[in-house]
Amino acid sequence: MKIAISLPDALFRRADRVARTEHLSRSALIQRALEGYLASRGADVTAELNAALDDIGIDAESDRWVRATSTRFARRRR
């Protein structure tokens, strides 16, 4: 899918330099950056949920219901 975005000039120049250095197109660089950002957001949510479960005494790694529910949730987000 093609989209148009607006970037500040300085950010565009930095991205262009990095893309050339890494032998990537600007599109590939922006795609990687967005994928990394979205992956880190998912990790943040998981860490927050695990902390909340820990606060109430549920071990997210060993609780069968939590594992099954988190697996279904992760599949839906893809």
Image (cartoon, rainbow, N blue to C red):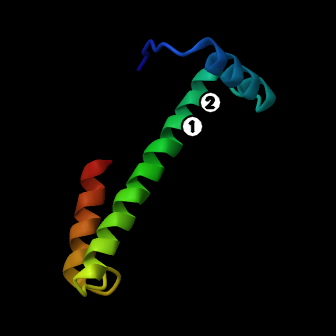
Above or below 24: residue 56 = below
Q: Which mark, residue 32?
A: 1
Nearer to the camera, 9 or 22: 9
Q: Where is residue 7 in the image (x, y as percent from the top left)?
A: 53, 16
Q: What element carries label 2?
A: helix
The quarter holding residue 24 reads top right
Nearer to the camera, 34 or 53: 53
Q: Residue at x 30, y 58 (%)?
A: 74
How many C-alpha atoms fall within 10 Å of the one at disc 1: few (<14), some, or many (≥20)? few
Q: Which residue is drawn at 77% across and 23% down?
A: 20
Badge 2 is on which residue? 29
Q: Where is residue 64 in the image (x, y as percent from the top left)?
A: 23, 83
Above or below 4: residue 69 = below
Q: Where is residue 14 in the image (x, y as percent from the top left)?
A: 70, 23
The reply to whether dot 2 and dot 1 touch (C-beta < 8 Å) is yes
Q: Is residue 7 left or right of residue 13?
A: left
The quarter holding residue 52 reads bottom left
Outermost residue on the front side: it is: 55
Above or below 6: residue 35 = below
Q: What element carries label 1?
A: helix
Above or below 34: residue 8 = above
Nearer to the camera, 36 or 48: 48
For the N terminus, the image quarter is top left
Nearer to the camera, 78 or 51: 51
Q: Distance of mark 2 from mark 1, alpha carbons?
A: 5 Å
Question: The residue under label 1 is which amino acid type?
Answer: Arg
Question: The residue under label 2 is which amino acid type?
Answer: Leu
Q: Which residue is drawn at 41% across and 50% down?
A: 41
